[in-house]
Each structure stands twice: as structure tokens, then as C-alpha cells.
Amino acid sequence: MNATTLLSRFRRMRGAAVPHHKETADFETTVMPLPREIVLPMQQHIGALCEPVVKKGDHVDVGTLVGHAPRGLSADIFSGVSGTVKAIQPVFYSTGKTDTTVVIEADGAQTVSPDIAPPNVIDRDTLLEAMKKSGIVGLGGAGFPTDVKLAPPNLDEIDTWLVNATECEPYLSTDFREMMEHADSLLHGIRACLKLLGVPQAIICIEDDKPQAIDYMRARTSADDNIEVRALPGMYPQGAENVLVYNVTGRVVPRGKRQTDVGVMLFNVTTMSMIGHFLRTGMPLIKRRVTVTGDAVARPQNVEVVIGTRIRDIVDYCGLAKEPHKIIVGGPMMGNAQIDLDYPLVRQNGGLLVFSEEAMEQPVTTACIRCGRCTNSCPMQLSPIAIKKAYTTQDADKLDKLMADLCMGCGTCSYVCPAKQPLAQTSKLARDFMRAEMARRG
């Protein structure tokens, strides 16, 4: 498929006007007390599992390396508490997959590892080397290892750095609070990356429903000739990577390519802030902010938690106003329902939504009425209902023609469907099936 065809698709992009539910945006971040213990899965990122480098009975400090990343696509994992390794055991995901976890019993002392010190970063190579020891991954949900993302083969061809601060998922306000509370770290990260990697400009992309953040970021960057703050329409999924690239730069990411292939580097705003924080302190990624809200939450808030804190502990801290019926990790459009409250919050989780049975009443699914809303709202102008039918018959060739691999999993199709068909779920299943089948064929 050529760029002109894809461009026409984006020109017709509509998305959906979903309710924002940003009631927590004005709530300053609170710090949750240390839990009794934390659970660190060895895969909190896209890529290979980390190997535990501690054993039962070992003492760890804050910032101690717990899981070592193998070479390639992976990211080190560090302890956010001081204490003793209690166990190394398996954990079962809601998807049916298993992982190895390191369970650490906190001693409350929070002694910091003597290895923690600001990295000596003076050029591109030292920046990339430092990032390998940071444990930072994409905090917008993808979990892509930062050190790998910062080193594309065509790094010298990157001319635009996009900072994704759109936060278009309903309910979530972690990125907004990052801009308002940690602008120093954010801007340090942006300026350092532009300078050390030789990228000429950065654009901080914020939806226009966040005027406070737009004004504040513009004031803080008024002396930066190479940093622009761009206000964008509040349309879901404005923050989807390829959509954002086109809406801001007019460039189309071809099928099967990445943003860097069109000269754009794209990072989540909180990820950029964590880069800045690491460069200034040397402390790896061990904690993060999470928005805890939903009609069943007694005290909705943005709370800073140690990575590895169990969902149960976070819910207990915020309290319950109603009997919880469904807990979603992430946002309501792209998040995942969680069945085990003992599962921990991991690096890429920015939301914890708790809803009552009343709020989560399941609509009745009826037959497709051929209204075309799913196609009209799809940012990629795919046909989710046609993809569903092709997936039902396991027709990989048909799915290839329908370009099922372009599905971003944004959930817009399911949201707008009057028949309440599970189109987002089947589109993602179809995408994964098609990719696996094509890989099998070689």
C-alpha cells in the first residue's frame, strides 16, 4: 500500500467523542505508604523476560537490580523498597500466561543502594548506555524499552521529537499531573535528548481539554526556541501513535513501518519526565503515579505507588464506596479487566478503575445492522465487522487484504456500535492471528 492511499485514510479519520471523566485531574498526587511486600514480575515490558539476579533470603535496597535484561529487547527491573527477598515464584496473568515474580518483604527502612548516582552523560553513546541501566519503558501503556527506542538505525534522520501528552483515555489524569507537578524533570529530559541525540525540535502535544497544562507548558518553554506546545482537538484516540504523527506533522507511517521511518521520535510525556529524573538522580524507575477512580472508589485520586504494589493494597488505600464488580488496569477503552487482586501494578500501568455492578451493566448484543459506524469511526478506516467475519472463518488471506494488522486496539469500534458487537476484541484477535499465520508461512 502506498503513502497516498494511507494518507486518504487519515484524512477521513474521525474517532469518537468519548466522555472524558477527568474528575481526578485537579487532585494533586498523594504518596501511598509502603506496602508490606511487593511483587515484581520479570516481564513488565515488550520483549524478553528478565532473569532474577537475587535469591530467597537476599537483602535488597531501594534501587537494587532484581531482574537483569538479556541483550536485545528487554529492560532491567529494580526494587522500590529495602527488605528481604521472600520468594521467587510464578504468577498467572488474566490472559492465561505465566511469569516469574520476585516477592520482596519490605523492612520500612528504605535504605538506598550505594550504586545509585547520577550517570555521567556527555554524548549520544553515554546517554544510550545510561538508559540501559534506568529500567525505563514506555509509560503510556506499551512498555517498549527506552534504551532500544532511543537507538533506531536511522537516528540521524530524525528531525522531530513528539512528546505525547494527549492522555485521550477517559478517567486517566496521570500525564496531566506529571506536567503540572514535575515540569522540571520533563523539560530536562526533553532538552537532554534533543541536544545529545541531535534532534532539532520537539513538540509537546496536549489535547485542548487541558488548557491549564497548555498554558503552563507554554510558559515554561517560552525561552526554548526548539520546543513547541501544540494544542490538539480532544478526539479519541488522538494519542494513538500513528494518528498523532499524522495530525501533528502530516506524515504517514506506512504499513509495517515505525514512526522513526518517517523521521519522528515519539515518547509519552511521563516517560520523558522519568528520563529527566534518572539523568538528574541516577534512580531507576521504581515507582509511578496511577489514577485510581470509578464509581466504586471511596476516595478517587492520583496516587504514587511503588512498582510491584498489589492491586488489593492500592484499592484498600483508596477505599471502597460500593461493592466492586469489575477492576480494570489501564483505561476503559484499552485497559484489561483484572481477576486477581493480588496481582501487582507494573511499570506501564497508569490507571486502576473500580466499578460497581450497576456501572458495568452488560448491554445485550444484537445482530449487525450494517450502519457502517465502526468503519466511519475507525482511525485507520478499517472495517471491523468484515474483519470479524474473516476471523470467524480463520481466513488469514482475507484478513491480510482487510489490513487487520493495522488495528491499534483502540476500542472505538465497540464503543460506537449500536448492536454492541465485541468488535474491538475480535479485531485484536484477528490481528494477532493474521500476524502469527503470516509468520508461520514465512
Image (cartoon, rainbow, N blue to C red):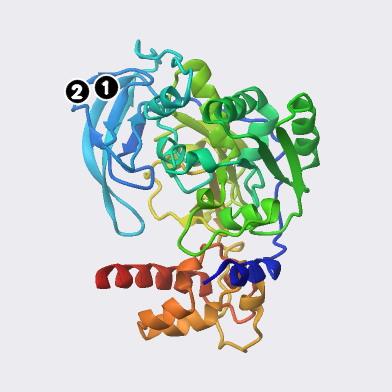
In the image: residue 103, left or right of residue 368: left
Q: Dot 2 corresponds to which residue? A: 57
Extreme-front residue of the structure: 156
Q: Residues within 10 Å of mark 2 (few under 14, many from 20)?
A: few
Q: Dot 1 corresponds to which residue? A: 84
Q: Is residue 97 above or below residue 264?
A: below
x 64%, y 47%: residue? 167
Q: Secondary structure at mark 2?
A: loop
Q: Is residue 333 above or below residue 193?
A: below
Mark 2 and mark 1 in contact? Answer it, CB < 8 Å. Answer: yes
Residue 184: give x, y in percent of width and height: 65, 22
x 66%, y 86%: residue? 371
In the image: residue 29, left or right of residue 313: right
Residue 340: give x, y in percent of width and height: 38, 51
Residue 415: give x, y in percent of width and height: 62, 69
Q: Identify which residue, 296 or 334, lies in the foreground.
A: 334
Residue 221: give x, y in percent of width and height: 74, 28
- Which corner quadrant holds the C terminus? bottom left
In the image: residue 145, left or right of residue 437: right
Q: Earlier in the sequence, mark 2 or mark 1?
A: 2
Three-letter amino acid code at the position of disc 2: Gly
x 55%, y 45%: residue? 351
Q: Residues within 10 Å of mark 1 (few under 14, many from 20)?
A: many
x 37%, y 45%: residue? 343
